[in-house]
Amino acid sequence: MAIVFQHKIQQQLHELAASAARPFVSWTEPLEDIDPVSFFMQGPACGFRERFFWSDRSGGTVFVGLGSAYAIETEETDGRFQYIEQERQRWAGQIEQHGEADMPPLLFGGFSFDPHRPPASVWRGFSAGKLVAPAVLLSVKNGRTLLTVTLPAGGMERDMERIGRLLRRMEEPLPFSAEFPTVISDEEEEKERWLAAVHEAIASIRTGRLEKVVLARARRLAFNAVIDAAFVLRRLREQQPFAYLFAFEQDGRCFIGASPEQLVRKEGETCRSVCLAGSVRRGGSVAEDEQLGAWLQADSKNREEHQFVVRMIRSLFSSVCETVEMPAVPQLLKLPHIQHLCTPVVGRGCREPSVLRLVELMHPTPALGGTPRERAMEAIRSLEPLDRGWYAAPIGWVDADGNGEWAVAIRSGLLEGNKATLFAGCGIVAHSDPTSEYEETNVKMAPMLSALGVMNND
Ligand SMILES: C=C(O[C@H]1C=CC=C(C(=O)O)[C@@H]1O)C(=O)O
Ligand SMILES: [Mg+2]
């Protein structure tokens, strides 16, 4: 079957390339069901240096990309979103689309948290903004699996060879390694120093200079062997079923995670977001879990932390949409390790034509930055010793029509060789207790720690 399929795709693309009126051609073909993580796993063996993975919270929409047919990248600071949007529009006009029409060409990528911060070397290649059109895209949507190949109309030979290899190998999936490497070193920022930064943030909030700031910390692990991103992805999929799963890999570095937080989704004139802030751990028994949830819903510190996010997103949606709907009181979102206050928001009659414009307006929400935004960013720059890179920043996809979905890249880590750097932060408000905030960051690292096979030792 794969051979027939391969010939069909190759032949179609060659014919299309010969007569193409635009610089890129894409061909989409239905495919038998295939495990998206196994597909992701095939990338390196077939010579693709870039890999992308995206699965929405329901697991109903999954995109896996291999290779890069076209990349849009910027190191601009203030104009990065406009530049990327402008180039996205230009790209949409350069692709000639063939085959199954219900899959518009798609770009996958992300932005850094703070482009004004000098980038640390571990984040090399993760620019201020980067979107990639994968050479091969597997998409699972509405119960259908499709394969899209996008190539430059001239010079497609090298890519065709890789794609041929991939299609041949798809029938013989690679075995997953049974065991995970073991930890040989484990470093984190000194606890006392982090607590002192939180104290300082609280003092600054009490003077009225700002209302809320999110402070993060990193934990750096080294293992006795190279970490297999596909293995981590598979574990995250098993362990975090209601999260966005994402991976963005280039040149041997993979930023990966399972985020519960939607930044924004746009589908035609409807846009959605979820305000997520305010947290407590899960209970050991049903009774304890319910008690903790009830406490969270009533706790004034957590309600305040949450309310800053609600206020900002409500006001932003009101400025770009005809109507905005949201519940009056926050609901509880229960995840395997943690529960959050959660307020879903729906805006109808959205006047913005591209999801990227919404991403620009929304990033960073007070769930990742703080309030007021600029003062919070200054506080993060002066109090946080780490470069967040793409952590806590938008990650997602946009199609040629400007529709797309973006998550906030939290509960995440950067993998390189045998090293993993994990990140977690928490919202500091006037009544925060530094030690409880520290514990909260431990709970937020648990999903990645457990996917990496490391016991959570908090
Ligand atoms: C910044 C993170 O979480 C945010 C999202 C939900 C709840 C949060 C909180 O309660 O502090 C944070 O604002 C993180 O997980 O690294
Ligand atoms: Mg919190």
Image (cartoon, rainbow, N blue to C red):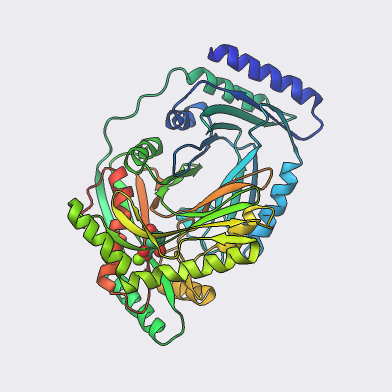
148 lies above or below 434: above
Q: Is residue 423 above or below residue 10?
A: below
Q: Quadrant of residue 192?
A: bottom left
- Can you see residue 117? no
Vertical placement of residue 47 versus 344, above or below: above
From the top left corner, tell me how far across and down residue 425 is, in percent.
37, 63
Using the image, determine if residue 171 lies above or below residue 344: above
Write down the quadrant of residue 242 in the picture.
Answer: top left
Ligand 2 falls in quadrant: bottom left
Residue 383 position in % (x across, y down): 41, 74
Q: Quadrant of residue 128?
A: bottom right
Towards the viewer: 289 or 402: 289
| Image spot of residue 108 (x, y percent) | 57, 44
The answer to whether residue 109 is seen in the rendering is yes
Q: Residue at x 22, y 55 (%)?
A: 289
x 17%, y 51%: residue: 285
* Between 20 and 273, the one nearer to me in the picture: 273
Horizontal and vertical percent position of residue 174: 40, 24
Quarter of the rendering occupied by the C terminus? bottom left
Query: In screen coordinates, is 127 left or right of 310?
Result: right
Residue drawn at (44%, 38%), measured in percent from left and top?
59
> Residue shown at 61%/33% (left/top)?
135
Left or right of residue 253: residue 294: left
Q: For the image shown, how many numbered marks are present on the structure?
A: 0
